Image (cartoon, rainbow, N blue to C red):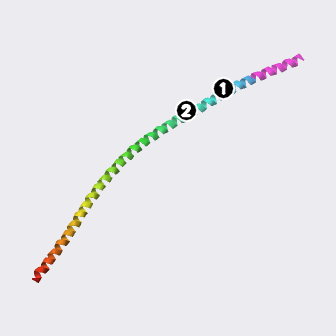
Amino acid sequence: MSSKNDKENDVLGKLDKVADTLESASSQLSGVVSQQQLDLVKERIVTCESDLSSFKQGLEILARRSAAHASDADMADTCMKETLEALERDFAGIRALTLSSFAISTIAIMGLIIYAVF
């Protein structure tokens, strides 16, 4: 019985060693997987930071261009208002000249009629 008992103890000892080996391998493997996951997350974070930096630069350029376009539009609006005011003054002047010429021509025709009658 003792040889059977020794064999069982020997088998149990070997099984304990195998279990310990599997446990340490499992622990090392989970550490490797965790490190790989951390490296992957780090790589993705670096990529996101790079993309974010590019987006920030793009938005700054867009903001500068938009400000320049807004300034140009404001200047064009001012010029158009000045041109419109000048056109309104010219129109008022032409209207006044037209009415004045009508009045003068009416007076001239009346003068010719009076001259012709007398």
SS of the residue under disc 2: helix
State which quarter of the image contains the N terminus.
Answer: top right
Position of residue 65 measured from the top left corner of the image (x, y, whole percent): 38, 45
Q: Nearer the viewer, residue 59 or 21?
A: 59
The amino acid marked with disc number 2 is: Lys
Foreground disc of the pair 1, 2? 2
| Distance (Cα) linking label 1 and label 2 | 21 Å
Q: Residue furthest bottom?
A: 117
State which quarter of the image contains the C terminus.
Answer: bottom left
Identify residue for label 1: 28
Sequence-first tag of 1 and 2: 1
Q: Nearer the viewer, residue 36 or 97?
A: 97
Position of residue 53 measured from the top left corner of the image (x, y, whole percent): 46, 37
Identify residue for label 2: 42
Q: Main secondary structure of the magenta part?
A: helix
Q: Residues within 10 Å of mark 1 (few under 14, many from 20)?
A: few
Tell me where the magenta segment starts and ends, as one range: 1-17
Residue found 71% across the figure and 25% down from its top: 23
